[in-house]
Amino acid sequence: MKTKFGRLLRSSRQSVGLTQKNLGDKIKRDVSIISRLETGQLSPNLDILNDIVLAFADLLPRENLESLWEAADFYITPTFDKPVSDPIVASIHNAFERLSSEEERIILKQDLLSMLKIDQEYFEAEKVRKKKKWDEAAEALMLIRSQMDRRIQVWYLRVDQELGDCFYSNISFSQALWNYRSALMSAQQLKDEHKQGEILIKIGNVYRRRGGKKNCGDARQYYNDARKIFVSLPKGRIPEAECLRKSAGAWIFEGRPDEAEKLCEQSLKICKSENYKRGQYKALQHKAWACSMLGRWDEAVRLCEEALDMTEDGWDEIKGYRYLGDAFRIAGRLDEARGSYQKALNLMVERDIKHSRTYGLIQLGLAKVCLRQPGLESEAKQYLDEGLKIHGGQGEDFRAIDFYVEHSYLLLKLRRLEEAKPLLELAMHQYEELDNIFNYARTLALLCELLYEEKKVDSLNDIQNIAKSAKEKDNGLINYYLAQIDFISGKAFADRRQFQDASRVWSLALGEALGFNSTSFNELAEKIFVEIERIMRETTPDEAYNLCNYYKVFLENSLSDKKWKPTDRDEIETLLRKIDEQQKHIYTLTPTK
């Protein structure tokens, strides 16, 4: 049966052109909550009512907002130009009307006026925060916090949580943790279990964003604690799915996509059973991320496209195109990657959103695309510089290291080796401290390329030994980067005419690449052929013929390894046939020296 509040809510929503989902997104509630409020199946609690008033504050006249409050059986008559948005203020106002002693009324009136002033300031701070002006919003909220009465715990809960959000978005993680923990204490004193779970997730987010094995382990512990709370609550399935997805993100940031994929599947299953589309979209994106790291690049693209189809206009669409751009880029489909990143940027320009983490990461993605294409170094530098305006100097976010790795790669391509080397060494040590083996191996591969250009053979051997140590901590996920390191080492042996060693290392590199995926194997095999053709032109035909023979022997020996699947063996046998063809033409080539 519809209530007066339900009818008013529906007419208010329709009058400003909002769907139930639009309103649900604004107040961070599921669309089913809005539907039940409008049909009278659910009465609004103070939290929901406050959020609804804030959502409509800039869209409806003041008298319409007051009507909503009155329809929900709250007697409120604001004494200033903005609606009263806090239920505590409302209850004091009602108490004021019931007091008989003039002295008591005067004291309470002073308290009320003070709190109304704070409430108005809070209302203004909320508007600034929603515009993503984090520094300005944090300053306003800190001023409000300094004026509040400690006895009113619910205000401390709200303001501390939102301060934490501002500091988190601004990558001031230490300050964010302080405010989140203060908010958690308030939620525990108020015995608000849902808020406790919500804040535990936010604390986990901070640790996850710091990256590394320890921080990501701490993040998963907070997510698990939150999940235990939500499992015991009615309608806790959707928050439970969120905890699983966040834990998957922590595994990804630790460089363990294999573990992440399992949790994404669990999260996706819950979201499908609850028909929670936004949760499905996010779980698909995280699974795509994991698949990219696992070398299943085409599957990652498909999952990102599936996720993007589920999004509606807004922030999720921007992120959807950014994730799709990442998937295309990693799969080597650079033109499609650039197109997806550009769509995300265009949407951000339309919404006047620029200074955000996502904007910085899109710039990084575009820089990576340019660095993998010849002649686009200056364009790559522009993207890196723009992204560094957001992420540069933000040492608490481990993803900032990625900008310095790509910057060093740019310097490497420009042959500015002395400038590139300290950046790469710094990144390598930071990833080592974080115990992030995946990104550590990636940085080692770039450092190996730099040392080859510097012709520092002994240092190359050191990198190979370090890579072997890293492999002992890994379960096959860094094979792609190990293959790159062995390929460069093989080039160094070939330059010194140590063809047997070059062939041995190259065959090892191909085995590592094939252990990652067939695309990597084919790309690396092509690079080795280019090197062999170079050597054939720089040496005698007999030496070149011997090099091919050594190469074939090592590859033939690798076929006896029981770890290869039938399709893997087919790849190696195809390569052997190609080498036979190459050998037939050796004596037709004229050596250059």
Image: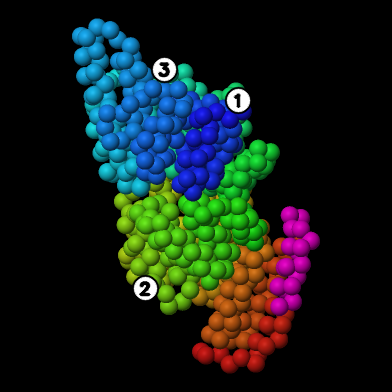
What amino acid does circle 1 point to?
Answer: Pro
Residue 72 in view here: yes
The reply to whether the C-beta atoms of the residues labelled 1 and 3 are less than 8 Å apart is no
In the rendered image of this protein, does residue 516 appear above or below residue 222?
Answer: below
What amino acid does circle 3 point to?
Answer: Gln
How many residues crowd mark 1 within 10 Å: few (<14), some (14–19), many (20+)?
A: few
Nearest to the observer: residue 235 or residue 171: 235
Residue at position x 65%, y 61% in the image: 298
Q: Left or right? Give the position of 145 relative to 345.
A: left
Screen quadrant of the N terminus: top right
Numbered badge on residue 189: 3
Secondary structure of residue under mark 1: loop
Magenta stretch containing residue 571, yes or no?
yes
Residue 427 percent location from the top left of the image? 40, 53
Q: Which residue is mark 2?
A: 378
**Which residues fall within the magenta stretch?**
561-578
Magenta stretch containing residue 108, yes or no?
no
Which quadrant of the structure image shows residue 530? Answer: bottom right
What amino acid does circle 2 point to?
Answer: Ser
Residue at position x 35%, y 54% in the image: 355
Q: Which residue is mark 1?
A: 234
Residue 381 percent location from the top left of the image? 36, 68
In 3D space, how far apart are the residues under numbered discs 3 and 2 (Cα atoms)? 56 Å
Residue 368 in view here: no
Whichever of callouts 1 and 2 sits on the residue coming sooner in the sequence is: 1
- Name the dominant secondary structure of the magenta segment: helix
Residue at position x 65%, y 69% in the image: 522
Residue at position x 73%, y 68% in the image: 571
Nearest to the observer: residue 340 or residue 368: 340
In 3D space, how far apart are the residues under numbered discs 1 and 2 (Cα atoms)? 56 Å
Front of the two marks 3 and 2: 3
Secondary structure of residue under mark 2: helix
